[in-house]
Amino acid sequence: MASSEETVLLSAMTLARLYGGLLHQVGMPETEAALAADTMVDADLRGVHSHGATWIPTYVKALRAGWINPHPNICVVTDHGPVATLDGDNGMGQLASIAGMKLAIKKAQQYGIGMVGVRNSNHNGAMSYYTEMAVREDMIGFAATNGGAIMGPEGGISPRLGSNPFSYGFPARDELPVIFDMACCIVAWSEFALYKARGEKIPLGWALDKDGQPTDDPQKAMEGLVLPVGGHKGYGLALGVDLLCGVLSGAAFNGDTVISWPSPNNLGHSFVAIDPACFMPLDEFKSRIDEEIRKMHDSARARGVARIWVPGERSQLTRAERLKTGIPMLRSVIENLRELGRKMGMSEEELAS
């Protein structure tokens, strides 16, 4: 978390209690609030603060206003062997996503592969949280979501696609799992809010203003368009995710996806779990993953490169370290959350660190 602003070290348990308490205060049952909070604490643990505490005020506002259903009835609407669709009942996207990946894993245990689409959902945080659910069950995991339209097609300046992130995960035996998580745009839209809060400019090449001109102003970026990663390649990936998560699941897609309320977001997600033991003995598969990872590590390095990293290693090591030493959080962010809790009637004991 690069900033000259003062930071404080807080434990994962402290953040979980704070985040969960705030969500519970606006109507979410305690268990569901804790589940949603866990996804955000995990993001902060891994250093992905754009999907952690930053989102709490937005969720609280939407839950208080009734724009997000605090107690959704997440239900199966189609079920055909290894494939199913869930309706998220306009609840927190994290809850529908956890349910979706759990069902995909259950189907993979029965059929060797499981795929679950989710519709009528909301923003669901970092995709890697859900692929790691599959990896912990010795499964290959895939997770994706469409999002509010913040990116144009190649050459266009009309918002048509979200950042549309996706993630894959592969379990290993002795090495850390391979966990890849990327948005199809150069940077997550929520990063602009972090730069704005810190009073910093964004790098040129990240975004366009509403007139389609390059900008380094995070406010103008939030009012304009995020640029796709890799130009037409990022555009193509984002379109594929929108087709998979929006069109196929029955959710909103293209310019119909929104990132604000009170209109229902109706976002769509997709979750896949694959049992590698259906291809070969599990231990053999995981040994082959280890071999792949070690060959990456053993690659000849360019000058000045100290180590070759495999996707997910740094975030997993960061999480392990922060579980021991604490999570560095901007003091202003934590104090703003506590003040929000006070205004909603939470006691100092509930807000204490």
Image (cartoon, rainbow, N blue to C red):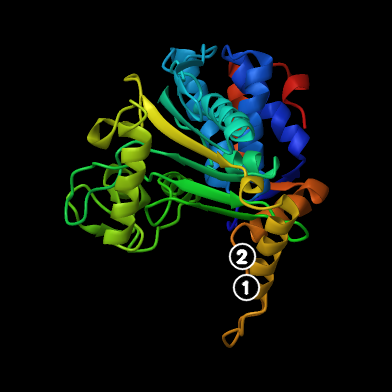
Quarter of the picture containing the C terminus is top right
Foreground residue, 200 or 24? 24
Disc with the residue nearer the chain's start (2 vs 1): 1
Q: Residue at x 50, y 36 (%)?
A: 271
Residue sitting at the far right: 324
- Circles 2 and 1, Cβ within 8 Å, touching? The answer is yes
Q: Quadrant of residue 241?
A: top left
Residue 159 lies left or right of residue 40; in this view the side is left
Q: Residue at x 38, y 52 (%)?
A: 184
Foreground residue, 180 or 47? 180
Residue 85 lies, in percent from the top left, at 44, 24
Q: Amino acid at mark 2?
A: Val
Residue 323 lies, in percent from the top left, at 78, 46
Q: Residue at x 46, y 52 (%)?
A: 199
The residue that mark 2 highlights is: 310
Foreground residue, 91 or 276? 276
Q: Residue at x 51, y 30 (%)?
A: 82
**Callout 1 environment at 10 Å: few (<14), some (14 to 19), or many (20+)?**
some
Query: Residue 179 bears which disc, if any?
Result: none
Position of 151 relative to 290 (above/below): above
Position of 78 relative to 211 (above/below): above
Q: Amino acid at mark 1?
A: Met
The residue that mark 1 highlights is: 296
Label 2 vs label 1: CA separation? 7 Å
Quarter of the picture containing the N terminus is bottom right
Position of 292 relative to 62 (above/below): below
For the residue labelled by badge 2, is the local secondary structure a helix, a strand or a loop? loop
Query: Is residue 104 among what the camera can see?
Result: yes
Foreground residue, 136 or 281? 281
Residue 348 lies left or right of residue 84; in this view the side is right
**Callout 2 environment at 10 Å: few (<14), some (14 to 19), or many (20+)?**
some
